[in-house]
Image (cartoon, helix red, strand yellow):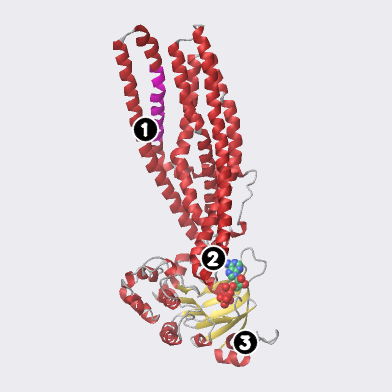
Amino acid sequence: MPAQRDGDPAPRADGRVRSLRNLWRLRRYLRPYAPAYVLLLLAALAATGAGLAVPLVVQRVVDGPIARHDPAGLLRLGGLTLLLGLVEAVLIFIRRWSQSSSSVGMEATIRADLYAHLQRLPAGFHDRWQSGQLLSRAISDLSVLRRFLSFGLLFLVLNVVTYVAVVILLIRLHGPLGLLVAASAVPLFLISRRFGRHYHTSSRRMQDQQGDVATLVEETAQGLRTMKAYGRGPELAGRFAGRARALHDTGVAKGALLAGASALFDLVPNLTLGATLVGGATLVARDALTIGELVAFVSLQLMLIWPVQSLGWIIANGQEAATAADRIQEVLDTPPSIVDAPDAVPLARSAVRGRLRFEGVSFRYPGSAEPVLRDIELTVEPGETLALVGATGCGKSTLLSLVPRLHDVTGGRITLDGHDLRGVRLDALRRLVGVAFEEPTLFSMSVWENLTLGCPDATDNEVRAALALAQADFAYDLPWGLATRVGEQGLSLSGGQRQRLALARAVLGRPALLVLDDPLSALDVHTEALVEAALRRVLRDTTALLVVHRPSTVALADRVALLDGGRITAVGRHGDLLATVPAYRAVLAAEPAPAPGLVRS
Ligand SMILES: Nc1ncnc2c1ncn2[C@@H]1O[C@H](COP(=O)(O)OP(=O)(O)OP(=O)(O)O)[C@@H](O)[C@H]1O
């Protein structure tokens, strides 16, 4: 669910139909398992048939060998009953075995598709969606679907078949009594419809609330240190308790709905059984029915109790699965907006000189009224290093994010050696561009894997050179060297260490374009000087765009561009701008900002 829709959703009137349609759309995942499903359905139906045959054999035992005192006949029919029981047990084993392997396989395939799709979705999608909502869809919604595919769906088919078969047998045994049992389907249908409607609303609410709780737990785990430092534990605990209580209340309401429906599903077959017992006994007294037929009738009717009683659970499971399918399709139906154009070209590293041009570039975040960037005209020549300077929040990181196409421009175009970036294959573009963000994210994998993320075939020497450049040789001294697994988001490393690893990752493989967001901000003065000296060597023959906050880092750049109010208001050498542009001086030297109009454009 997008972040804006935090809280209880308001299910729309057509919600149930849409959910069921979404459940039906997942049938493509069933296809590879069709043979297994046919096998398990046949096994289940045969097992039900064997089970249904038992009361009919019992009828023959009562009316035949028992009435006629025939021990040989009793032995024969007793043996047949035993055989039927054995066959039923074997068939149930086959059903359960093939059922669990198919449903687990389907769950894994849907999860893999969901994960692959999440990766294809642009950064803008992830900005809007809470990660807990995505987590709960990938984990708990898929488990609900697995349960439905392995039990709910099967028992829905099986129970309907059992119900119809038993009713036909009952009508054949005694027409009027059989029709009485058949008539009990009417109240069952009405109860099911009403229950299904209410349960759908509750289950959607509960699954969304589970996502909200997952989001809060995830945020708390990530921001634990900030939370503790500010002593906000009790407040967050209060917020968590509120959401957990809402989830609990929905769960209780859902449970109450299921309990009410289950009681009715229990009552209807028992009332019908009472009525047929009275009617059947009367018929036996009038010799219109044999005792054996009555025993068979009642035994068969008893076989309806479980299918009807389980109806509440099956409907609940089906509704939850439909809601889960709805929530999963909401993600799968979001089209990846940043994709390869049909005629996209794969630019090879060797063919790239590295002339980067922003031509009338504008950018507005989805849902925002105002553009963050307007009419950006900027050229970075091959091998040149251009620093972007500007007040906080003026759009520097946004401008950088347009180069590897994390977002697409909403106006104008960006070209690399004259090629519009949207016409370059994404995989090629992302190999050409080395990126280090302001917040250096490391994944919970080894240092080596983190470093070679964009360059999986890097050699030992290349990695060593990148680490040396970023002054990150400390990685070799970690307990297992480069094989050391860094914790979630690299939290076991200091901010400066993480930043140096992220810088090494960006420069590894000598990309044609380097895009660095304040790459030295977390380093001490001494390390900064060392990294700067090494970086200067790399930057000599790489086109680079750097976001810079500190005057010391500006020294790395050949030219500087000042971003102000979403526009480039000055471009030039650091010394020149410092001397002639008061706004530039204000940003870098913490002088008071000049009045508008004094800025050179
Ligand atoms: N995902 C987003 N959705 C909507 N608005 C955003 C998003 N990310 C950033 N913004 C807005 O865009 C503007 C520019 O943000 P950006 O991060 O590019 O600024 P910045 O110059 O890099 O700031 P800083 O120097 O503090 O890092 C800000 O007003 C910010 O609120």
Q: Nearer the viewer, mark 1 or mark 2?
A: 2
Mark positioned earlier in the residue sequence (1 or 2): 1
| Figure check: 14 above or below 346 | above
Q: Which residue is mark 3?
A: 586
Name the spot of residue 78 as percent of width and height, x first.
Answer: 32, 18
Q: Which comes sooner in the sequence, label 1 or label 3?
A: 1
Does the Cβ of the disc 2 residue fall within 8 Å of ligand 1?
no
> Which mark, by number, is residue 348?
none
Image x and y of residue 579, in percent: 60, 93
Q: Secondary structure at mark 3?
A: helix
**Which image quadrant: the C terminus?**
bottom right
Q: Which residue is mark 2?
A: 233
Residue beneath disc 1: 92
**Main secondary structure found in the magenta portion:** helix
Instruction: Using the rendered view, name the quadrant where residue 389 is placed.
Output: bottom right
Q: Report the Cα–Cα distance between label 2 and label 3.
A: 39 Å
Tag nearer the camera, 1 or 3: 1
| Helix, strand or loop under label 1 | helix
Whether ligand 1 has any atom under 8 Å from the Cβ at mark 1 is answered as: no
Location of residue 352 in the rendering, given as x and y in whole percent from the top left corner = 45, 75
Q: Nearer the viewer, residue 355 or 242?
A: 242
Instruction: Please state which amino acid type lies under the numbered disc 3.
Output: Ala
| Residue bounds of the magenta highlight | 38-57
Report whether the residue tagged 3 is closer than 8 Å to ligand 1: no
Distance from the alpha carbon under mark 1 to that under mark 3? 79 Å
The image quadrant where one finds ligand 1 is bottom right
Amino acid type, mark 2: Gly
Which of the pair 124/343 is nearer the observer?
124
Q: Amino acid at mark 1?
A: Ile
Determine whether label 1 and label 3 are within 8 Å by CB. Answer: no
